[in-house]
Image (spheres, helix red, strand yellow):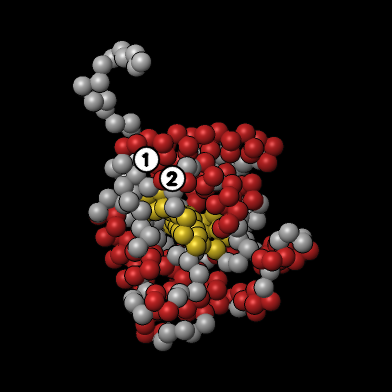
């Protein structure tokens, strides 16, 4: 199984109906932990080289979207995978509760401002999908409003792609018991307890509602232009490995190259 590219195995095919209960969040698709450190290290070197060429070429914008239920590992993915990238060309945006200014605009306004420029790899830690996830689960807008947003999101992403942006979206899948373990570990660790909020437990009580919201977002918004990848994320090492491999394959397809050297620059030059 490990011989197959994870990009093909984990992609949500456009038009398919996602059932998260049918996906094992502990699946490693033939990979094993003993080899994972070396595979990930190689993957990060690959990503660093790709970003260097992408940044130098200044031709392709890339948008990476990370979504998942609380404690799924979004921050960990940024820390362990996106650390391969130079911050100079890799802005990370963490979308929290909208500000008063953001609320005075349409829901995509705050997101579009952070879309990547040419040569950038922009990371969205949470994203525009919150407006069909938390907004839906907490009934923050009427159903007739959020139901329209799947098509609006698809249209917005398609516009970005038609303008040259490459979009790759990762949904990090953990099960309910794994979330419990992570919340407990977060609470028990004095250096991480600051991340724990009592509200996390209230959100945990809405697990089934979130699963339904995730399933519809994945089913409705995995397109040929901007596919979703469901990453089994119970095992952090496999999550990191899968994201690094898939992102590397996507960037490889862009064939980024260093710019052609200005012909006025001599082949041999000694600067004194």
Residues under numbered marks 1 and 2 in contact, where contact means CB atoms less than 8 Å apart:
yes
Q: Nearer the viewer, residue 155 or 53?
A: 53
The residue labelled by disc 1 is 55
Q: Nearer the viewer, residue 38 or 4?
A: 38
- Which residue is at 31% across, 12% downward? 268
Q: Secondary structure at mark 1?
A: helix
Left-right relation of 68 to 35: left
Q: Nearer the viewer, residue 103 or 28?
A: 103
Compared to residue 101, the image places residue 55 above or below, namely: above
Q: Quadrant of the C terminus?
A: top left
Q: Nearer the viewer, residue 196 or 131?
A: 196
The residue labelled by disc 2 is 88
Compared to residue 146, the image places residue 85 above or below, namely: above
Can I make out residue 48 in this image?
yes
Question: Which of the two labelled residues, at mark 1 and mark 2, occupies the earlier sequence position?
Answer: 1
- Which residue is at 46% across, 59% downward? 93
């Amino acid at each position: 199984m490990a011989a197959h590219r994870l990009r093909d195995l984990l992609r949500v095919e456009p038009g398919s109906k996602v059932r998260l209960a049918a996906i094992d969040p502990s699946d490693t698709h033939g990979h094993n932990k003993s080899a994972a450190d070396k595979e990930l290290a190689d993957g990060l070197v690959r990503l660093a080289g790709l970003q260097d060429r992408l940044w130098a070429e200044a031709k392709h914008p890339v948008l990476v979207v990370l979504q998942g239920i609380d404690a799924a590992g979004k921050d960990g993915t940024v820390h362990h995978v996106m650390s391969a990238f130079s911050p100079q060309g890799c802005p990370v945006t963490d979308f929290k509760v909208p500000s008063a200014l953001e609320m005075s605009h349409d829901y995509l306004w705050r997101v579009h401002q952070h879309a990547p420029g040419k040569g950038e790899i922009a990371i969205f830690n949470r994203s525009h999908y919150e407006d069909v996830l938390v907004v839906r689960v907490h009934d923050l807008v009427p159903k007739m409003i959020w139901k329209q947003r799947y098509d609006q999101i698809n249209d917005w992403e398609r516009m970005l792609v038609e303008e040259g942006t490459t979009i790759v979206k990762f949904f990090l899948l953990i099960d309910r018991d794994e979330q419990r373990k992570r919340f407990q570990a977060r609470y028990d660790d004095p250096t991480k307890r600051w991340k724990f909020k009592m509200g996390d437990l209230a959100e945990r009580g809405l697990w089934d509602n979130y699963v339904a919201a995730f399933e519809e977002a994945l089913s409705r918004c995995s397109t040929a232009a901007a596919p979703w990848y469901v990453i089994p994320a119970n095992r952090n090492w496999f999550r990191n490995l899968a994201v690094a491999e898939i992102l590397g394959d996507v960037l490889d397809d862009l064939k980024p190259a260093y710019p052609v050297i200005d012909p006025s620059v001599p082949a041999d030059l000694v600067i004194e």
